[in-house]
Amino acid sequence: HLSLLVCLLFLGKFACAQADFEKRLQTQFLMAEAGDVIEIPAGTYQISRSLWLDQGKDVTIRGAGMDQTILSFADQAEGAEGIKVTGGSNIVIEDITVLDAIGDAIKTQHVNGIVFRRVNTSWTGRPKKTNGAYGLYPVQCQNVLIEECKAVGASDAGIYVGQSSHIIVRNNVAHHNVTGIEIENSE
């Protein structure tokens, strides 16, 4: 009985630590100021709602490595994306994995200067139509760079760039998506 009690205490402490981490991370996204670097340490973190950056300027979201910092949205209860960035300029997202988002893994809209570098967006298990539509999804953006990224299991396109200008998409891997890489109405 003592070992069961210790186990329950440990699991409760772990769940509280996860909730505290998510709350701190959400606050960093919401309160980001020009020049901020949101550092996410190595580890696998359960995230229950979309992380949203609105009107950020010169903000970097950086993990410890594509295979080392993992944000799992498998139990997502709120939001349509894993990470959403709207408006702003000069945003860098790098060295991170976003797993099992309820909708699009990472969507950026109306951003001037967005870089995705060494970002993995994946849905685990077999590909299925209930997976999110897009892995990396910059739309209506300017000055887009997507490099050394990976997209797996999207129910539409792993990497989709739409209605954007001045885009570079290079050295990426996309598989088990309906479409690997789709660039539409962009230059």
Image: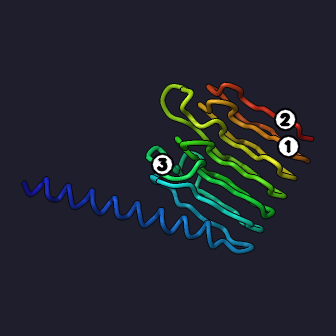
The residue drawn where x is 55% and y is 65% is 26
Q: Nearer the viewer, residue 118 or 24?
A: 24
Seen in the picture, residue 129 relative to 136 is either above or below; the reply is above
Three-letter amino acid code of the residue under disc 2:
Glu
Where is residue 177 shown, x and y percent of the image?
64, 27
Seen in the picture, residue 65 relative to 124 is either above or below; the reply is below
Three-letter amino acid code of the residue under disc 3:
Gln
The residue drawn where x is 54% and y is 36% is 123
The residue that label 1 is drawn on is 163
The single residue placed furthest to the left in the displayed view is 1
Marker disc for residue 92: none
Mark 1 lies on a secondary structure that is loop
Q: CA distance from mark 1 to mark 2?
A: 7 Å
Marker disc for residue 76: 3
Name the N-terminal-most of marks 3 and 2. Answer: 3
The residue drawn where x is 50% and y is 69% is 24
The residue drawn where x is 70% and y is 74% is 33
Question: Looking at the figure, which quarter contains the C terminus?
Answer: top right
Where is residue 61 shown, x and y percent of the image?
65, 60
